[in-house]
Image (spheres, grey):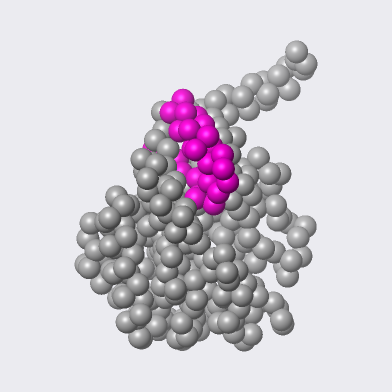
Amino acid sequence: MRIELTSNVFYGDDWQEKLDECRACAARYGFEFGVQLHNSASNDMVERLTGADVPLSAHLPVNGEILLNLATKDVSAAWKEFERQALFCHANGVKRGVFHGFFMTDLPILNFGPHLNYDAALGRICRPELALLPGSRLNRNFADLLEYGVRQSLLRENLARLRERFPDLCFCIENDFPAYSSGNMLPEEMAKLDHFYCLDTSHLWAACHLFGRDFHQEAETLLATGRVRMVHLHASPYGAQTPQGKWSDGHLPLATPNEMNLPLLIRRFAAYGVDLIVLEIPAGTVADIEYTGNILSGKEAAHESGKEASHRTGDKG
């Protein structure tokens, strides 16, 4: 099992100290520690981490100009960027990457980062007719549209080509946060792609709430394909009392109060043999590694059982 933090954690003068603490913490649980280079990582950050002798994965496109939309007829620009990303991965020992590859548009989508935030980058492709509510960035479920089926078929074909072109690299496609006409929202649709997957917990949490689905059942649908090669794990503060139009993403520390039942989910990851968990938390710390480690090692379950036994016997000691 490898546990990673996102590269966003390692800005600042104390980055080496943080890296050493994370390595030591992961080792105590018997895990390898690594870092996922975020697509917004600066050149300085890339140089810092590639020189730190730490295993790396990548959120593609690292330092790329456009996002990698494979659900469109003209994918020439995306292939050019994939070639560049593959060279980067080979040069830096990166074996696994993740990308967002399904957008309901033929327009180029600029990569977001320090100079262009997520809303500014994705807002340019927003289609009001696909929105959940008037004026909202959030999507409705548009999987029944003919256009959706056409684009999904294109995506499936292009993913097959991706595997053929880069057989030594595992480029996972991620389930999307349901906004700005992003298409990979529900596992039952993703499962049709027959590709490698990254399961993002808070993205799925939001989609399940907006579309009236059971979060853990939907996660199980994707895990049961046997093709989940990566997990993006983070907590979402949104819940049953949050109005639909007010939902946003998560990316918060795992101890953040939430309604997700993350311990149950983490145990399912282990049961299905997922061996790369990325704590995609910009403010992540060793506490998030410990949270995950305690669950995977059974310490959290034993603690919960002890609390239940004390409650049943009336023991307050």
Residue 6 picture location, percent across and down = 50, 50
Quadrant for residue 123, please give it. Answer: bottom right
Residue 172 picture location, percent across and down = 38, 60
Range of the magenta residues? 1-28
Query: Can residue 129 be spotted in the picture?
Result: yes
Residue 84 picture location, percent across and down = 31, 68
229 or 264: nearer the viewer: 229
Taking the image as shown, residue 217 lies to the left or right of residue 95, namely right
Q: Residue at x 78, y 16 (%)?
A: 316
Taking the image as shown, residue 205 lies to the left or right of residue 256, namely left
Q: Is residue 23 magenta?
A: yes
Q: Quadrant of the N terminus?
A: top left
Q: Residue at x 53, y 69 (%)?
A: 112
28 or 228: nearer the viewer: 28
Q: Is residue 51 magenta?
A: no
Total marks placed: 0
Q: Outermost residue, top direction? A: 317
16 or 212: nearer the viewer: 16
Taking the image as shown, residue 126 lies to the left or right of residue 168, namely right
Q: Quadrant of the C terminus?
A: top right
Q: Residue at x 72, y 82 (%)?
A: 134
Query: Can residue 219 be spotted in the picture?
Result: no
Residue 257 picture location, percent across and down = 71, 44
Q: Is residue 172 above or below residue 146?
A: above
Quadrant for residue 96, please give it. Answer: bottom left
Q: Residue at x 55, y 32 (%)?
A: 290
Q: Main secondary structure of the magenta part?
A: helix
